[in-house]
Image (tube, grey):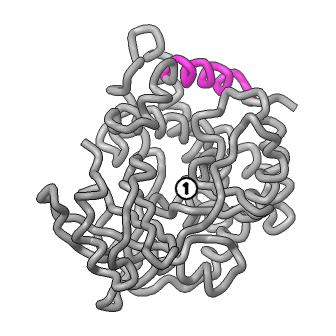
Amino acid sequence: MPMTAQDIVPALELWPRLRGASAVLVNHSENHTFRIDTPDQRCFMLRVHRTGYQSVQSIESELAWLQALRQDTSLPVPEPIAGSDGHLLQDFQALDGSARQAVLFHHIAGSEPSLQDDLTAVFHTLGGYAATLHRHAAQWKRPAGFVRQSWQASSILDADGPWGDWRQAPGVDAQNRPILDRLDAALWIRLADYGLGPDRYGLIHADMRLGNLLVGGGHLSLIDFDDCGFCWFTYDFAAAISFHETNPVIPALKAAWLDGYRAVRALSPADILAIDSMVMLRRMALLAWIGSHAETTLAQQHAPGFADGTAALAERYLRGPLWPE
């Protein structure tokens, strides 16, 4: 069962500015996200972490990168707020009895973009954001003890990956399983051939999907670094089209993303060729995620037909480019 506003009342006591505030659950995906409105008309977002997903060290590493990005770049990313004890990450006992961890952020105005709109400009900007992140990550001296997960073939395709086993996902059956197995095998080979060179692999956001973008006042903001980790740089494009890989507008959005990216950071022909593999790796990650997060609205929304759609994409990928020029 999702947490309720009542469950997090003890957390509100950890930030003095939240006294007397009201809370509303706005998202339940990997974590619970609550909008917090205070009596003096201020607004914040409280992220309550999914139990057992990220360690304390991993969350603190994410927050360290966020703070560095805010200091070193002009990227519009979330600003975490320390509690009364000076720490960004807070522990509390929820009223449902569970031990929880939470981070408070300043609210960012805006709404999630939709593929029903013309997102060409959004993806051009997003490509520039990704390149700026990657350039920063390559130059940034990470603090001692920095730990984030790696998103590779093993962490996504193996049965014991952090998002679960794609083989157990809803809709995987005797008809589509053979092609998905072929895709799995091909990804292992192609990703190994591409390699983990520092020009193509490093710290990335890893979840730049539409649900983690906010458009408002002519500005695009990038939120939710909870899945940031070490992966191939072009995986950030694959994440940007999450759940929409079969939409006919994707080739145009890919072109816009690449234009925005290359205005900031170069990509080699091998990088561009590897984008298809990133899209399929992400698709398999999402297939596993849908199976292991069946209680969420997002998983329920996309589960019907997702396995068959992944198999259809796999057939295209194994024959040639996903989006022929």
**Dividing the image into 4 quarters, which one contains the C terminus?**
top right
Residue on which the image places disc 1:
206
- The residue furthest top is 175
Q: Name the residue located 30 percent from the left edge and 57 percent from the top edge.
A: 5
Which secondary structure, mark 1?
Answer: loop
Position of residue 294 in the picture relative to residue 94 (left or right)? right
Q: Name the residue located 25 percent from the left edge and 66 percent from the top edge.
A: 9
Name the one closer to the observer, 66 or 31. Answer: 31
Q: Where is residue 26 in the image (x, y as percent from the top left)?
A: 45, 52
Residue 147 visible from this viewpoint: yes
Q: Name the residue located 33 percent from the left edge and 62 percent from the top edge.
A: 48
Number of residues whose C-alpha sits closer than 10 Å to that of mark 1, classed few (under 14), some (14–19) or many (20 or more): many
Q: Position of residue 30 (x, y in %)?
A: 38, 50
Q: Where is residue 67 in the image (x, y as percent from the top left)?
A: 53, 82
Q: Is residue 270 above or below residue 130?
A: above
Residue 52 visible from this viewpoint: no
Which residues make up the magenta segment? Answer: 307-321
Q: Where is residue 118 in the image (x, y as percent from the top left)?
A: 82, 41
- The residue furthest front is 39
Name the one closer to the observer, 171 or 275. Answer: 171
Q: Name the residue located 69 percent from the left edge and 47 percent from the top edge.
A: 113
Asked if residue 109 is among those painted magenta in the image, a careful observer would answer: no
Amino acid type indicated by mark 1: Ala
Name the one closer to the observer, 6 or 64. Answer: 6
- The residue furthest left is 97
Position of residue 283 in the picture relative to residue 291 (left or right)? right
Position of residue 63 in the picture relative to residue 201 (left or right)? left
Q: In this view, does 280 lie above or below 313?
A: below
Asked if residue 312 is among those painted magenta in the image, a careful observer would answer: yes
Q: In this view, does 107 lie above or below 114?
A: below
User: Can you tell which quarter of the image residue 74 is in?
Assistant: bottom right
Prevalent SS, magenta region = helix
